Amino acid sequence: MLSPHRPSPKPALTLALSALLAVAAPMAAAQDAGEGDTGTEAAWNVRGGVSVLSDYVWRGVSQTQEDPAVQAEINLEHRSGFYAGLWASSIDFTASGEEDDGVDYELDGYLGWAGELRPGLELDVALTRAAYPGARSGFEYDYTELEGTLSFAEYYHVGLAYSPDIFGLGGRGYYWNAGGEWPLGESGFGLKAQIGHYDLEDAAGDSYNDYLLALTRQFGPVQAELQYTDTSSYGPELSEALDDSKLADGKVALVVGWKF
């Protein structure tokens, strides 16, 4: 999954993001109007947001050649816990001097359910199809992934994601993770930490660990996150099959997002 650097979104991504927001605005307005009329929670709710990132790091590895990214999401949630949505991000898998794969953005569609199993224990299960429009022949990365996350004791979570054909490599991928997020007193700041293990032995002949430590701050509907990420055991097999190991080195990134 390795194009010349693209520090700004391409027209295709800009159109995709604009379309998401164009759909979101009237749906959100209709939702607010419905709640105002009845005074009760609507059966369906629209959620979404836009984020700007100094570097899009996913499971410890930069997806943008360490350049900035812009992301947008829109989803529809039912009060029963079922939801569906679309998520888009600018990406750049090709390093300078390598053959261009034709991919400028990722577009994910997902279906899921989230709810409380019992007091203090919540489950979130989602099936995602990740697509990379515009990919040239020989650079097909599309894959399907099923992910489950258990949240407990208010601040903690554990999760597992499985793909039968991760990144179109023809093999399975398993991603295990555990972490937590805690408020720092009454300061308005929060601390987030996570450790993960990505088992790509079947697909790429190796596995690696990733780590995340972040400081968060909420400003109304805007949330800022300053994160440090790193990996270990990211060997030459993964550099050959996926991204260069330098993209998995320790790095600091800033994420600022607006949600509605």
Image (cartoon, rainbow, N blue to C red):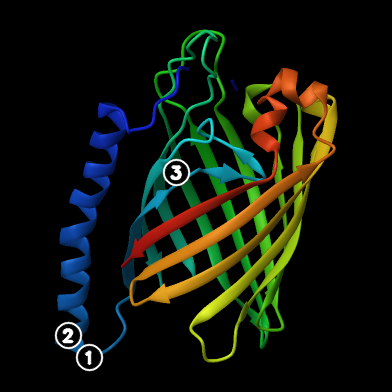
In the image, 111 versus 98, the foreground residue is 98
In the image, 123 versus 66, the foreground residue is 66
Q: CA distance from mark 2 to mark 1?
A: 5 Å
Q: Earlier in the sequence, mark 3 or mark 2?
A: 2
Mark 1: secondary structure: loop
**Residue that carries the numbered disc 2 in the rendered image:** 36
Q: Is residue 98 left or right of residue 255?
A: right
What is the quadrant of residue 125 in the picture? bottom right
Q: Is residue 137 left or right of residue 41?
A: right
**Residue 43: x and y, percent?**
33, 75
Q: Is residue 159 left or right of residue 88?
A: right
**Residue 7: x and y, percent?**
38, 31
Is 4 above or below relative to 65?
Answer: above
**Residue that carries the numbered disc 1 in the rendered image:** 39
Mark 2: secondary structure: helix
Labels 1 and 3 touching (C-beta < 8 A): no
Task: Tell me the amino acid under the disc marked 1.
Answer: Gly
